[in-house]
Image (cartoon, rainbow, N blue to C red):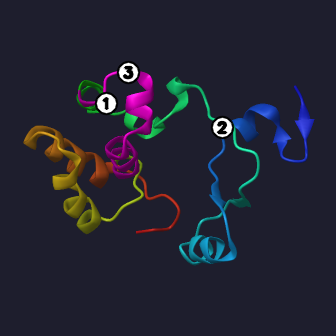
């Protein structure tokens, strides 16, 4: 197993990290309690099956693939990014409720997203 300054290769590849572009973004992330921050460097897009991890694991992923058929459409859609943040626990309930009408999902999917958000473990100290 390849070792580097960040530990085994697999741990670096699957870690959670927030990348920032400038000192202001770094400051905001630090104030939000994000524990792992790094400046943006060379960025390589992961394979499509690695994208939107929390959403991919959820019961509503099929609804979003129906809305955005094809890997690139699914991966690049703002709605899937927001749904992934909801399912991943990155948003407070009030934020979720505000975003739901913008996602263009059915009432059933909206209710499922609210339930999933309530069950999610908070991430990056935003709650």
Q: Secondary structure at mark 1?
A: helix
Task: Tell me the magenta residue range.
Answer: 67-86
The quadrant of the picture occupied by the N terminus is top right
**In this view, 75 is above or below 25:** above
Residue 6 lies left or right of residue 107; in this view the side is right
Please provide percent x and percent y for residue 86: 34, 51
Is residue 81 rendered magenta in the image?
yes
- Residue occupied by mark 2: 14
Q: Secondary structure at mark 3?
A: loop
**Residue assigned mark 1:** 61
| Element class at badge 2 | loop
Please state, as top left, top right, bottom left or bottom right, where the C terminus lies in the image: bottom left
Mark earlier in primary sequence (2, 3): 2
> Is residue 57 visible in the rendered structure shown here?
no
Classify residue 40 by image quadrant. bottom right
Q: Which mark is residue 70?
A: 3
């Amino acid at each position: 197993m390849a070792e580097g300054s960040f530990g085994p290769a697999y741990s670096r590849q699957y870690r959670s990290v927030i990348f920032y572009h400038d000192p202001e973004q770094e400051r905001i992330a630090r104030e939000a309690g994000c524990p792992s921050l790094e400046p943006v460097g060379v960025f390589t897009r992961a394979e499509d099956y690695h994208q939107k991890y929390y959403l991919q694991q959820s019961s509503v992923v099929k609804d979003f693939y129906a809305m955005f058929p094809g890997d690139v459409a699914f991966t690049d859609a703002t709605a899937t990014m927001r749904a992934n943040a909801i399912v991943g626990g990155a948003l407070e309930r009030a934020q979720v409720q505000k975003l739901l009408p913008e996602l263009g999902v059915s009432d059933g999917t909206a209710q499922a997203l609210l339930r999933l958000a309530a069950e999610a473990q908070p991430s990056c100290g935003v709650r």
